[in-house]
Amino acid sequence: MSSRHEETTRRTASGQPGERADEFTTVSNHPVRRLYTPEDLSGWEPVRKLVLPGEPPYTRGIHPLMYRSRLWTMRQFAGFGSAEDSNQRFRYLLSQGQTGLSVAFDLPTLMGYDSDHALAEGEVGKCGVAISSLADMELLFDRIPLGGVSTSMTINSPAAIIWAMYLAVAEKQGVDWAALNGTLQNDILKEYIAQKEYIYPPKPSMRLVIDTFEFGARHTPKFNAISISGYHIREAGSTAIQELAFTLRDAIEYVEWGVARGMGVDDFAPRLSFFFNAHNDFFEEIAKYRAARRIWHRVMTERFGAKSPRSWALRFHAQTAGCSLTAQQPYNNVVRTALQALAAVMGGAQSLHTNSLDEAWALPTEFAATLALRTQQILAHESGVTSVADPLGGSYFLETLTNEVEAGALEYIRKIDAMGGMIPAIERGFPQREIADSAYRYQVAVDRKEKIIVGVNEFTGEEKPLETLQIDESVRGSQTERLRSLRAERSSDAVQRSLSALRKGAEGSENLMPLIYDTVKDYATLGEICAALQEVFGTHEEAAVT
Amino acid sequence: MLEKRIRVLIAKPGLDGHDRGAKIIARALRDAGMEVIYTGLRQTPEMIASAALQEDVDVIGLSILSGAHNTLAPQLMNLLHEKGMDGVTVLLGGTIPAADIPALKKAGIAEIFLPGTSTQDIVDFVRQSVEAKAR
């Protein structure tokens, strides 16, 4: 069949320019042939590999009915300025039909510094909300009943501390922890690889992650203890295959550590969740999500002997690609985002964030954020793609690409296994270097116009600038004032006692969550708690790879 | 003729860890034949100014995607002035709202490069500004 097509196209090509380019590749530089036929899938057994949606290995999705039974959670990442500012945005988004919250924290919070720390100057409230203590967290969730929402929190190095604050707010609201729904990002490995918001060295950081797994398995059965993230790896410039491979290899690392702690794999694996990018290349992205589910099923059953189907099914959140947004002709971003979101939906995402058109310039305005949410609502209610489970299953191209992406990722996973796992791989800079190489290759291709970006290297034209969100510079001042009165009002004896108990605990090997919870309840600040742990754990320094 | 190679310090000030852009620019300038020093992450303006002095660079390229540019960039410019390093060309790249650009230029930033800038444009700008100062 494909040879007949080869013949036909060769004949039509004679004398005429047949194809637009010598080679066609995905945005990840993966080769794409001109046509896919059953021959590409020869030896491939749909009965075993594909089966039905809701059946292992879940290539076609983790639910039998997919979006016919329940739409994905529309979860817009938001947070800026003070806790009061963000609380207002959250309550607005919920009133507009958003179905889950997703908290963005500012850089000082992500790095474990209080808003009044010298290094926080200029950063407070800028790319997320400033949270320095339980008092700020109480304001952030004021009049938002935690029993009725699902909350995702993008926090990593200080994840255990921020989570303890969330649990303390729930307790104050009288909400049973067992009823809490949400996700803690808590994925420290991808910080060393890509996003670089690390504090402690890898091993003590991993201990904190496993402490949250253990604590969560006991107290918060509906809360995802981690969101193992490829998003940031992709944003740092990886290919789709690298994103998939490094994320899944990170996940393997977490499971190995959990098992080594003495937990049964089925006791915590059902609470592992994933987070992938939704980039420009439509079919490659869908193939990536399908391959992810298939590999994870195999990892859980074959590598870890998981018995529970809930451990086997890879659930994921997707976010459209921030790095694909252009500062030039920003309204084009609405279209890009819609296509990327469609890929996430066709790939079976459980929740989704769509970026706003103005994010190459600044944090989104309320107008831009609303339009991004509307994009999801149009996909869900107008496009018709939600009426069928896995509408693209069986496409020769998509199934072949899924197989290729799967094979490429497995190859990387084998390589990292041979290095002794992800931590040794990170220490020798392997994933970092692979990503930097891919990022540079892509930039060169864009500079040479081998890859076209509309409005940037082709179809350019002047535009008038957008109205962007201005973050009030007064947030640092008001936060500093609030911290000063907090420190004056709280019992400093209690704070010193709970912090020194935490330090002592950190020197041993017990689970630190209960000790962290005590410090938080005494209104120790995030900076104080992180510094106490740093005294014991030390600080991570990376050898920069350029 | 022995031409002195252009020396560039690529620096990541503040807490921001997004280093994709900084690394790409470092590599592109190096491929263009320049001597490039990359500071790594989380540098204070003081650290950047002393690195620039120590390395005797012609150009400093700052990369900021966290929104802290209005604080960090002018701080660096003041420090360079105090150290008598007004001859160093300072460039800024990252997520910079259009409204902030005039004040940053007034503070002495030679040029602001927004997302989507080709690396060739940056290479050309660096060469031209160093040549202009050498004259």
Image: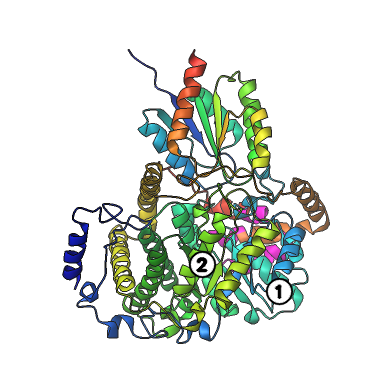
Please count the marks in the image.
2
Q: Is residue B84 above or below residue A489?
A: above
In the picture of the structure, the residue carrying the numbered disc 1 is A170
**Under tag 2, what secondary structure?**
helix
Which mark identifies residue A341? 2
In the displayed structure, A2 sits above or below A129; it is below
> What's the magenta region?
A503-530
Query: Is residue B1 located in the magenta-colored stretch of the structure?
Result: no
Residue B49 rendering spot, x and y as whole percentages: 57, 28
**Residue B132, relative to residue A171: is it above or below?**
above
Residue B81: image quadrant is: top right
Image quarter where the N terminus of chain A lies is bottom left
Near-viewer residue (A242 or A114): A242
Protein chain holding label 1: A
Magenta part mainly helix, strand or loop? helix
In the rendered image, which quarter is residue A290 located in?
Answer: bottom left
